Amino acid sequence: MVPEEWIAHRREDGELVGWIRPAGDDWVAVSLLGWDVSDAVGWIEAEEALEDLGLRWLAEVWTLERPGGQPLRVRIVDLRPGRVVVQTDDFGAVDASVERFVLDWPAPPTLRLRA
């Protein structure tokens, strides 16, 4: 779950884009995956880091590394504090067979943006 001291940051339309957490006298921007996306910076810089990140990255293709298995091409299908759900990429096919994986939150480093 999201630590109590983290402060939600929302876009103008009210959509949550991440959190800002205290780091001594500074602040750190945290993505919806629970990953730090800035160093310890001032409040405005932390807000700007989240605004720059936005939400478009959620629609990107990701790679999920599996112990003893081939890396999988996946997409994020559900994201909330407590869990991240990804599924194998269906390449837009309506009738494709997909496999879903429920991951911990913050998301593990085995999930990474596909290069």
Image (spheres, rainbow, N blue to C red):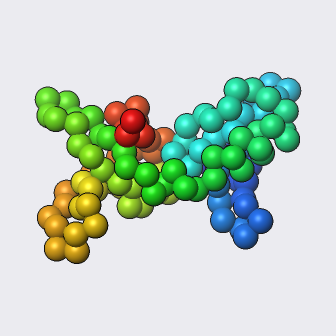
The vertical placement of 59 against 115, above or below, is below
The picture quadrant where one finds residue 71 is: top left
Residue sitting at 19 percent across and 61 percent down? Answer: 98
The vertical placement of 56 against 108, above or below, is below
- Taking the image as drawn, is residue 5 in sight? no
* Residue 54 drawn at (x, y percent): 63, 53
In the rendered view, does 23 fall on the left or right side of 79?
right
Residue sitting at 73 percent across and 61 percent down? Answer: 11
Residue sitting at 34 percent across and 33 percent down? Answer: 110
In the rendered view, does 63 fall on the left or right side of 53?
left
Q: How many marks?
A: 0
In the rendered view, does 57 fall on the left or right side of 11?
left
* Residue 82 drawn at (x, y percent): 46, 51
- Taking the image as drawn, is residue 66 in sight? yes
The picture quadrant where one finds residue 3 is: top right
Quadrant of the drawing holding the C terminus: top left
In the rendered view, does 51 fall on the left or right side of 26?
left
Residue sitting at 42 percent across and 40 percent down? Answer: 113
The vertical placement of 105 against 42, above or below, is below
The picture quadrant where one finds residue 20 is: top right
- 81 and 96: which is toward the camera: 96
* Residue 33 drawn at (x, y percent): 51, 45
- 24 and 11: which is toward the camera: 11
Question: For the view shown, which residue lies furthest in the bottom direction?
Answer: 94
* Residue 49 drawn at (x, y percent): 71, 41
